[in-house]
């Protein structure tokens, strides 16, 4: 506690800065991270981590268990066939690789509706039934309709699974959909990859379970969010898998161990068929996205998000360290220190990424910029407040809290000019505490100051907000009454005189004092400047003093004549 007080007293600016950056961090972390213009750089920072992790990761386990048969440009060229190909070609392909006993043959191709040549459907059905390990693709349309394989093909295969993948706001695929609720059938269905993995494990498709939070395939538990999706971990690019062009399957023979006990994925890899997608590792065909997904299942290795409270704590520690490191540092050093801190944070983030733990990698840069802006805005407004405070102190009397004589002369001139412009009445009242010197001599200056302060408070409390009260000098006070004719000023002055005369001052001392007041007004007194109205009110005050005190006197031409006579004498 003593250390905190010492730190606060010596480094108030640092404490304020830390408070601002923590507030900025909380606002960013809990409210702004999902806003589109901040969500996209957040995703791009995650992609940088994916590329870095891909470069330094060792060879992925079980990658040899997945074989991709590619419907590529060379296959179109060497087979000399236009899309869509006859289904008999796929049947022939299945017949060629089935004897090698692959675990699963999964088509990332949809066989929707009857073929133009019905005999092809029958031949494909026979090939699928004979192999007894084929699964085909289904998909959901944009309006939610479930498009399933042609019934004869469906009956001959082991099943079907959807191939739809959700896209992020930048149209990249970073997540996969494990489960989807079919509005048409009113039931849950699973993806092609999940069903292919179940067949690989020699499990019936109806053994796949969904409990709202996970999809379980016996011992493999896939955590999903409320939309049924999970984060993809792209371990390998297209050419890093075992890729066999479709035409080679048709025209050449392969050793049996090429396919034995493998998951065979068949799908398009050329851009003509529009199944190439943006991913963190670049453009990847849909069939290879499914291959990466199957690697996650085979290795039972799924992405885990860091707990939100822990991520926020790490970010807070980061911004606090940045604030302390850069506190009062010179600009070149600030840049190097900030860069160093960000690099350390990203290195930590990369280590976590390699362990499949994800966090917001864009946050450091975002918080540095946001904190700088937040502190700059605070300093700007703090400077404005300080300037206002200094101005207020410059025009405010420290003892009474009233405006000073300097401000009085400026404001009076302004009000008189406004009165001339808009034909408005302006009155000035100058008040003086009677026999105030005697009060100071009798009770001391400290008590005199208390009385002066209390008198000022009574005047201020009983004056309209539109009117302005000033300390004219010593024990003299004055009030500019806007939009007030002379008779109104007299009523006001008399009210103030009575309040003060009936009040006891200085607390237990119960001292009583009175005031005398002089009133002058524009334009009735033929006054056309601030100096003239001050002189007129001063003459009226002098008259009140001469004629007995504790009274209100108004300026009249006779007072001016008397003053001139005295001046000549």
Image (spheres, helix red, strand yellow):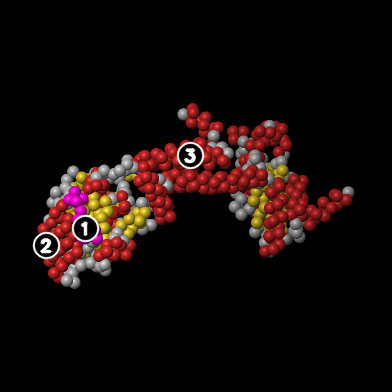
Q: Which residues are magenta?
A: 246-259
Q: Residues within 10 Å of mark 2 (few under 14, many from 20)?
A: some
Asked if the stretch drawn in magenta spans residue 249, the answer is yes
Image position, residue 26 (x, y; %): 42, 45
Q: Residues within 10 Å of mark 1 (few under 14, many from 20)?
A: few
Quickly name the residue at label 1. 252
Q: Mark number for residue 340?
A: 3
| Residue 456 position within the rendered picture, expressed as x and y whole percent measured from the top left | 64, 43
Q: Earlier in the sequence, mark 2 or mark 1?
A: 2
Q: Disc 3 versus disc 2: distance between alpha carbons?
A: 64 Å
**51 to 511, vertically: above or below:** below
Marks 1 and 3, how far apart at CA = 56 Å
Residue at 11% in and 62% down = 126
Residue 45 lies, with reference to residue 344, above or below; the image says below
Q: Is residue 28 magenta?
A: no
Q: Earlier in the sequence, mark 1 or mark 3?
A: 1
Label 2 sits on residue: 126
Between 408 and 153, the one lying in front of the other is: 153
Where residue 469 sits in the image (x, y, percent)? 65, 48
Residue at 67% across / 36% down in the picture? 448
Helix, strand or loop at label 3? It is: helix
Which element type, helix, strand or loop, lies under badge 1? loop
Q: Is residue 557 left or right of residue 92?
A: right
Give the quarter of the image for residue 128: bottom left
| Most common secondary structure along the magenta stretch | helix
Residue 461 visible (yes or no): no
- Give whichever of discs 3 and 2 has the lower sequence position: 2
CB of mark 2 within 8 Å of CB of mark 1? no
> Quarter of the image holding residue 329?
top right
């Amino acid at each position: 506690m003593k250390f905190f007080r010492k730190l606060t007293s010596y480094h108030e600016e640092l404490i304020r800065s830390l408070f601002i950056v923590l507030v900025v961090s909380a606002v960013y972390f809990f409210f702004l991270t999902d806003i589109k213009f901040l969500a996209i750089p957040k995703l791009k920072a995650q992609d940088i981590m994916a590329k870095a992790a891909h470069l330094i990761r060792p060879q992925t386990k079980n990658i040899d268990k997945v074989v991709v048969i590619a419907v590529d440009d060379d296959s179109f060229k060497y087979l000399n066939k236009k899309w869509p190909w006859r289904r008999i070609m796929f049947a022939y392909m299945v017949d060629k690789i089935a004897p090698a006993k692959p675990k699963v043959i999964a088509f990332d191709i949809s066989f929707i509706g009857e073929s133009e040549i019905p005999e092809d459907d029958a031949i494909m059905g026979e090939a699928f039934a004979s192999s007894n390990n084929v699964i085909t693709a289904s998909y959901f349309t944009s309006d939610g309709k479930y498009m399933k394989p042609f019934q004869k093909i469906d009956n001959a295969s082991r099943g079907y699974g959807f191939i739809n993948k959700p896209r992020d706001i930048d149209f990249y695929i970073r997540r996969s959909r494990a489960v989807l609720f079919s509005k048409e059938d009113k039931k849950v269905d699973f993806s092609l990859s999940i069903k292919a993995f179940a067949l690989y494990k020699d499990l019936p498709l109806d053994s796949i379970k969904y409990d709202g939070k996970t999809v379980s395939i016996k011992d493999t538990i896939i955590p999903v969010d409320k939309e049924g999706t999970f984060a993809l971990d792209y371990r390998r690019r297209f050419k890093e898998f075992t890729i066999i062009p479709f035409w080679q399957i048709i025209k050449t023979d392969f050793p049996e161990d090429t396919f034995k006990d493998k998951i065979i994925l068949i799908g398009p890899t050329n851009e003509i068929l529009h199944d190439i997608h943006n991913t963190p590792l670049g453009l990847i065909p849909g069939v290879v996205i499914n291959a990466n997904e199957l690697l996650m299942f085979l290795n039972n290795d799924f992405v885990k998000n860091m707990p939100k409270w822990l991520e926020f704590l790490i970010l807070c520690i980061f911004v606090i360290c940045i604030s302390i490191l850069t506190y009062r540092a010179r600009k070149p050093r600030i840049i190097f220190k900030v860069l160093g801190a960000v690099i350390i944070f990203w290195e930590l983030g990369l280590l976590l990424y390699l362990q499949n733990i994800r966090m917001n990698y864009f946050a450091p840069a975002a918080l540095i910029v946001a904190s700088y802006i937040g502190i700059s805005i605070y300093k700007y407004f703090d400077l404005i407040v300080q300037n206002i405070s200094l101005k207020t102190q410059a025009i405010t009397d420290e003892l009474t809290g009233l405006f000073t004589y300097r401000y009085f002369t400026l404001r009076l001139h302004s009000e008189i000019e406004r009165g001339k412009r808009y034909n408005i009445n302006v009155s000035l009242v100058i008040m003086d505490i009677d026999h105030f010197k005697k009060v100071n001599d009798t009770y001391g200056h400290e008590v005199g100051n208390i009385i002066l302060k209390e008198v000022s408070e009574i005047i201020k409390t009983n004056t309209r907000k539109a009117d302005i009260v000033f300390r004219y000098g010593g024990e003299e006070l004055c009030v500019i009454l806007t939009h007030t004719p002379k008779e109104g000023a007299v009523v006001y002055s008399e009210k103030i005189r009575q309040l003060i005369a009936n009040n006891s001052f200085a607390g237990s001392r119960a001292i009583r004092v009175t005031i005398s007041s002089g009133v002058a007004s524009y334009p009735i007194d033929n006054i056309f400047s601030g100096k003239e109205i001050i002189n007129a009110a001063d003459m009226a005050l002098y008259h009140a003093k001469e004629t007995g005190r504790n009274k209100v006197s108004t300026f009249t031409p006779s007072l001016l004549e008397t003053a001139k006579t005295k001046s000549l004498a």
